[in-house]
Image (cartoon, rainbow, N blue to C red):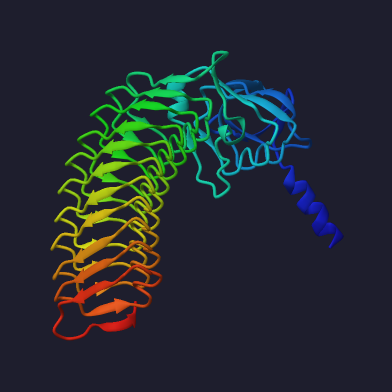
Amino acid sequence: MAVLGVLLSLNAFAYDVEIDGIYYNLIKKAKQAEVTSGDSKYTGDVTIPASFEYDDVTYSVTSIGGNAFYNCSGLTSVTIPNSVTSIGESAFYGCSGLTAVNITDLASWCNISFEYSFSGTTNPLSYAHHLYLNGEEVKDLVIPNGITSIGYSAFSDCSGLTSVTIPNSVTTIGNAAFSRCSGLTSITIPNSVTSIGYSVFYGCSGLTAINIPNGVTQISQNTFNGCSGLTAITIPNSVTSIGYQAFYGCSGLTSINIPNSVTSIGESAFQGCGGLTSITIPSSVTTIEGSVFSGCSGLTSITIPNSVTSIGGSAFQYCSGLTSITIPNSVTGIGRYAFSQCSKLTSVEIGSGIQSIGESAFASCGELLDFSCAAETPPTLGTD
């Protein structure tokens, strides 16, 4: 066991070379180097060079390896050169003292590949929150012309950002590109953008309005989750689907127009949007998914079209402002807790097509006095 412990200890600090306090693994054939962890923790201000010489060979620094700065709580700033194209999983995990990320070229930064990490700390901005370009903090971000895509997590957690301008050359905004940019108040997205990834604006609580370009076909899961400052949004006719929790917790949203092009609205898409007072579901939608409007306490009316065949569990749960509901003949099933806790609901009309009503579908609706069901055969009760 003692021998195994020694081997593990040596392996924890495995590196090929140390130059000026920075540890590297070498990819000799490609003449490339990866920043890695070393014998001691990185502290203070660390400047990673674009290249260095070792044994009469010039190596280009192209990556920061997984766990390279793991738990380096004494690290206060890091300068990342344009030569770096990838940053590995948990590279900056635990860097609680990190306050600044320094770069010299925005185009290179937009193209860095940040490896997916459950810890959410692949991008050093997760701790630093402030990005500096050639010595000046980036607050009003202008993406350079010529950039075609903004990569995964490129500016996530950069709470120092207040505005973003994206050029017409950009067609794709990657997953979580601006997630948790809580200081962001405005962003301009050109019509050239056809793809917006999931969680792109997750947690952007300062964002008040945004335009979705006409070429975008889907609003992905969690795209605007937690955008509590968002008051209005227009969804273009090009959009066919609204993903899981897309607008979850957008408590400031007062109105939204869902076009007829939309055929599916994901679970919990508008959950917790307490500021919504009314909404029209287009006739292109056939299923109202679970929890889709749960917690929309300001909702006073809802129109369910004849195209809808099922209403999912908890779909309208805690919609305490809802006073009446008409369920069309096309609906065959109502899920469990679908309208539970709708404390002001006084009138419910259920159409002739109903076959099943889930457990506690109308539980805790204390004001419900007028309840009618047009079905010739009584629906099954207490099912999902």
* Residue 289 shown left or right of residue 285 in the figure: right
| Residue 356 vs residue 172, the one in the foreground | 356
Image quadrant assignment for residue 74: top right
Q: Is residue 40 visible?
A: yes
| Residue 59 vs residue 177, the one in the foreground | 177
Q: Is residue 57 visible?
A: no
- Residue 129, image x, y percentages: 57, 30
- Residue 346, image x, y percentages: 29, 66
At horizontal 70% and vertical 38% (from top left) the residue drawn is: 37
Total numbered badges shown on the rendered structure: 0
Q: Is residue 194 above or below residue 187?
A: below
* Residue 308 shown left or right of residue 161 in the figure: left
- Residue 210, image x, y percentages: 32, 32
Image quadrant assignment for residue 375: bottom left
User: If the image is split into quadrants, where does the C terminus sit?
Assistant: bottom left
At horizontal 24% and vertical 63% (from top left) the residue drawn is: 325
Q: Is residue 78 above or below residue 90?
A: above
User: If the image is split into quadrants, where does the N terminus sit?
Assistant: bottom right
| Residue 274 vs residue 336, the one in the foreground | 274
| Residue 68 vs residue 78, the one in the foreground | 78
- Residue 361, image x, y percentages: 34, 73
Residue with the most extreme top position: 135
At horizontal 61% and vertical 34% (from top left) the residue drawn is: 127
At horizontal 58% and vertical 41% (from top left) the residue drawn is: 121
Q: Is residue 373 above or below residue 244?
A: below
Residue with the most extreme right position: 2
